[in-house]
Amino acid sequence: MALIEVRELSKAFRVRRPGSGARAKVARMFHPAYETRQAVDGVSFDIDGGEIVGYLGANGAGKSTTVKCLAGILVPDGGTVRVAGLDPVRERIRLARRIGVVFGQKTALWWDLPVAETFTLLRAIYEVPPDRYRTTLDTLTELLGLADLLHIPVRQLSLGQRVRADLAAAFLHGPDVLFLDEPTIGLDAMVKSNVRRFIKDIRTASGVTVLLTTHDLADLEQLCDRLVIIDRGRVLFAGSVEETLHRFAPYVRVMVEFAEDIAGSVRVPQARATATADGRHLTLEVPRGDGAAAAVTSYLLDRFPVRDLRLTDPSIEDVVRVLYEGASGAPDEPAHV
């Protein structure tokens, strides 16, 4: 049964039109001109109860606008939205008790209060029974490693500590739906791993439904059951993570720095060069899976004086670009540089 239903959702904003040239910019200060920009344009999708669905696209594609419409923060211009059977605009207060929201760059915590006092205020706001609150808080404290943070003012927390506290705050009242907007942005590898583990564990324990926006492919691969990809406010593709990565991100990048200039060409089986070597640097694309990345790495280390070697996933912008252009981008010829 669909816990989130979106049908032909649209949302536009009236924005100030920039002037070109110094004189035009001065004129716009006193006589501003405006234009309408369509942030979301006829988006439709369903999410079943207990699913984790990744909602992704390039910057400005309409992800955060969609999440804010689903959470009742923004009023849609058109279409219909139902979350947990409720209209986010007309039943905003009832919906607030059924959802949790985390925006990676913003906090729902009170800046000058210790974390524990923020949680106590949220318990009162959501009218969580004391026994259930204590049990839930104990579980969240253990899962997110919050024991040493509870009595520290929010303003003194690092970004990673604050995100963990925000996740706990979003789940204190036991929501049916979690909206996570870039929850791992700016976090180091260890904190990202902890956040992902929490999301997995809490879904297993409670059956919560999660809509996740992110620019990190590792978030998608490790957490999501399905993906919905949008660009310029419209859905471009919806399918499983495996299908998406196979079709639109079938490679990983190998970035190499040599200890000395390499004379002549560099031929690497199973890889394709995407950037010309300047004597010391080379970027390769290697097919995902089947041990290709390990084989290419071993080949380079055995035959060349490698100073540094890194493997990276393509960015979400790369995935959307490939999808939008209808290209596969799969390397099938050895690299010649």
Image (cartoon, rainbow, N blue to C red):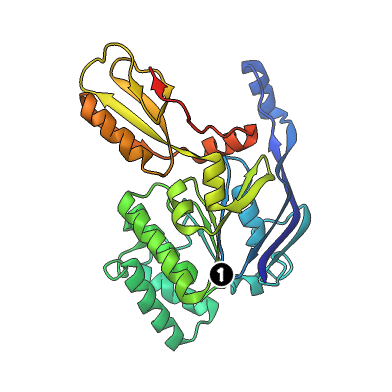
In the rendered image, which residue does mark 1 sit on?
50
Image quadrant occupied by the C terminus: top left
189 over 302 or under it: above or below? below
- Residue 293 horizontal/vertical position (percent): 35, 38
- Relative side of 125 to 88, left or right: left
- Residue 37 horizontal/vertical position (percent): 72, 38
- Relative side of 228 to 43, left or right: left
315 over 77 or under it: above or below? above
Q: Quadrant of residue 91?
A: bottom right
Q: Quadrant of residue 27?
A: top right
Q: Secondary structure at mark 1?
A: loop
The foreground one among 144 and 22 is: 144
Q: Residue at x 53, y 76 (%)?
A: 125
Q: Residue at x 43, y 88 (%)?
A: 131
Q: Residue at x 61, y 17 (%)?
A: 22
- Relative side of 297 to 336, left or right: left
19 over 153 or under it: above or below? above
Amino acid carrying mark 1 in the image? Gly
The foreground one among 77 and 268 is: 268
- Residue 333 horizontal/vertical position (percent): 45, 26
- Residue 320 horizontal/vertical position (percent): 58, 38
Q: Residue furthest right?
A: 78
Q: Residue at x 48, y 73 (%)?
A: 122
